Image: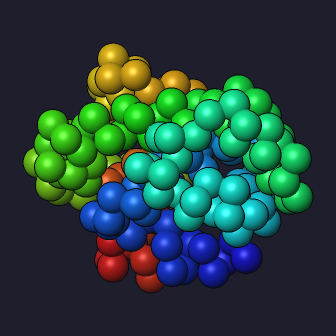
Amino acid sequence: MLEKYHDTEWGMPLFDDRLHFEALSLEVMQCGLSWMTVLRKREALRAAFSDFDPAAVSKYDSSDVDRIIRAENVIRSERKIRAVISNAKAFLRIQDEFESFSRYIWSFTEGKVMRYPEHADGNMVARNELSDTIASDLKSRGFSFLGSVTVYSYLQSVGIINDHMSYCFCYAKA
């Protein structure tokens, strides 16, 4: 499961807004858990959160929080569930302001994939100045559960930061 995710999704430049919202939401759900746990629960989370449609999720209320907590095979953290709902509202505001969330998030790198040569050689970090800047901006726009470390993971997953190893076949693709 991890290998397929790595080979087909992780680190590939992403421009679809719904998929950006899914990636952000999965990162929120992952806090404190292994990524494998999130991947195993991904389909159930998609079902619980209307296929991560931010417009639909933004309309959720307390009854939806209760429904999700009772759903099978989801991450049952009320704080995380409420964060995803709140983030959907902030996500829509960004879409309104920038025409798309993708345009907003890629603007931090002027549309370029960031490559850090030292990372490709195995000198990885958990956060950097870019993730600090974006996390701060997201927070100022009403996002929660998205600190710098979580944002860094998100930037890796959506291909804004290429942290594939230099010998990985995906390094040149991203």
Which percent across, then down, holds residue 82? Answer: 63, 31
Farthest left residue? 110
The answer to whether residue 156 is left or right of residue 80 is: left
Camera-nearest residue between 28 and 92: 92
Camera-nearest residue between 100 and 104: 100
Identify which residue is drawn at 33% across, 79% down: 173
- Name the quarter where the C terminus is drawn: bottom left
Which percent across, then down, holds residue 132? Answer: 37, 25
Where 90 falls versus 116 (above or below)?
above
The answer to whether residue 93 is left or right of residue 24 is: left
Identify which residue is drawn at 49% across, 73% down: 9
Which percent across, then down, holds residue 122? Answer: 52, 54
Q: Quadrant of residue 102?
A: bottom left
Which percent across, then down, holds residue 152? Answer: 46, 40
Identify which residue is drawn at 28% across, 64% down: 15
The answer to whether residue 174 is left or right of residue 59 is: left
Farthest top residue? 140
Camera-nearest residue between 57 and 133: 57
Where 132 falls versus 23 (above or below)?
above
- Name the quarter where the N terminus is drawn: bottom right
Q: Is residue 85 visible?
A: yes
The answer to whether residue 29 is left or right of residue 118 is: right
